[in-house]
Amino acid sequence: MASDPAGRQSEVRRKAGRPTKAVLELGRITQTALKLVRQEGYQGLTMSALAKRLNVAPSALYNHVRSKQELLILIQDHLMSLVEVACFDSKPWDEAIQDWARSYRDVFAHHTPLIPLIAVQPITNSPQTLRIYEAVARGFQRAGWPEDEIVNAIVALESFIFGSALDVTAPENIFDVGELQAEAPVISRAVASRETRFGRYTAAPAFELGLAAIIQGLRWQLSTLSEGRSTI
Amino acid sequence: MASDPAGRQSEVRRKAGRPTKAVLELGRITQTALKLVRQEGYQGLTMSALAKRLNVAPSALYNHVRSKQELLILIQDHLMSLVEVACFDSKPWDEAIQDWARSYRDVFAHHTPLIPLIAVQPITNSPQTLRIYEAVARGFQRAGWPEDEIVNAIVALESFIFGSALDVTAPENIFDVGELQAEAPVISRAVASRETRFGRYTAAPAFELGLAAIIQGLRWQLSTLSEGRSTI
DNA sequence: ACCTGAACACCGTTCAAGT
DNA sequence: ACCTGAACACCGTTCAAGT
């Protein structure tokens, strides 16, 4: 045994050859990778570092994932399971979107390197992503959205959510204008004015403003879209 | 001379030591990097590959940029100069936002690896980013937006734009449900329904729906916000 | 089937030596 | 000041050998 009952690494080195019991499985790989990311960030997530935590040679990982990219997809799918969608069964459409959007943003705010990946990842056989889409789509359907606009609405919301997740980790000084203040008087005053009201930069007010706006806009679109259809 | 008058590489190798005239400058580095990205993608943008195109040793680049990260910021600032903001001087607020948002999204759609970087990059001394913010802020100001909400509105729009830029490169099959169709009937029908109307997946309809919604929502917010202020 | 250990073809970056 | 060339400390990934 290379690890003690509590799962801690030991100094005992395993010999080459097939162990009596599989040392790795996808679940443990994903969990360990996630813990590594939480402690060291994505910059610290290397195949070597992960292998070390699993008390295994780096090459052993390739018996379970085809590439690091595939590992990232495993992490992503796991994170998707943390996104809240129960609200769509218990709340009206527009309120449910708020709960869902906030939890979605919060989950990925500290996993921004995954976001460019998620955005283009086919949902085929990605059960957790599908679970989210199904719940949201049911919410839209129940609200009376035309079926052929549901996907567009979800994508639009996701775009805003992903962009907002990236903003969460912005530094406090992101809007410091610096030396060029004289050439940008309007934005300079707007920045100062924002700071007086909200203090040093945080992503929350912009997210809430945008979320309220987009939901308001979707509500308005729903009324005109369904009017358009009922006259057919 | 290591390159002929047309700037093409030649086989002549420069000796060590300071050349009579600086071989590199930031402008040429940025332009060459951009050309490399357009031809080979970000995966092909390595310090070695860039140095080779500049007919220079990789280490020479470090006389001009502190790191690859700094190179990416140079590229980003250059791309910002391609974003259209003249519309804010010639069109009403809400129409100008549409032109601006579309051009912003189009510029970064094929530079998605930069997006996580831009989103957290301080604007200090980044003249092109400041130029954009100033123009948009003036548009909002003229429309009567409360000064302390202008930055929030810009950030909200940018979040949507960045998220939408990521969506542009999504593959056609991104919404293929695959084997799990039985467990996700509502989204499956929505996907089929979208396809009948819009064909294979493209990002455009979702972007236009979301953009219309968010502008509609901001318009509504503007009216209630300014009402709120006028009663003070 | 699933591990080890060596090897491969890269990365970004540093630095002494050169003019 | 600004280049070359060698070197460093990594990457992700492949593969023969082992049980």
Image (cartoon, coloured by chain):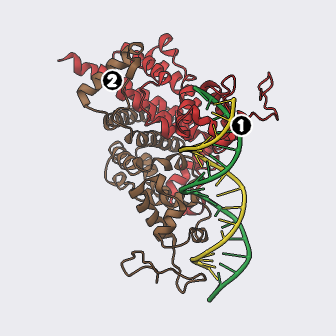
Chain colours: A brown, B red, C yellow, D green
Find residue B164 and name its label: none
Helix, strand or loop at disc 1? helix
Residue A196, percent from left and from top: 24, 25
Residue B189 location in percent, x, y? 55, 52
> Are labels 1 and 2 on one chain?
no
Residue type marked 1:
Gln
For the image, the number of numbered tags is 2
Q: Which of B140 and D4 is in front in this view?
A: D4
Toward the right, the furthest residue is B11
Residue extending farthest top = B90
x, y percent for residue D6: 67, 50
State the separation of the CA atoms marked 1 and 2: 39 Å
Q: Work out which quarter of the rendered image holds the C terminus of chain A and state it.
A: top right
Closest to the observer: A181 or A209? A181
Tell me the element at label 2.
helix
Q: What type is the residue that disc 2 sits on? A: Val
Residue B39, numbered circle:
1
Res B163 visible = no
Relative placement, left or right, of A63 versus B143 is: right
Neighbours of disc 2 within 10 Å: few (<14), some (14-19), many (20+): many
Height in image: A54 above or below A180? below
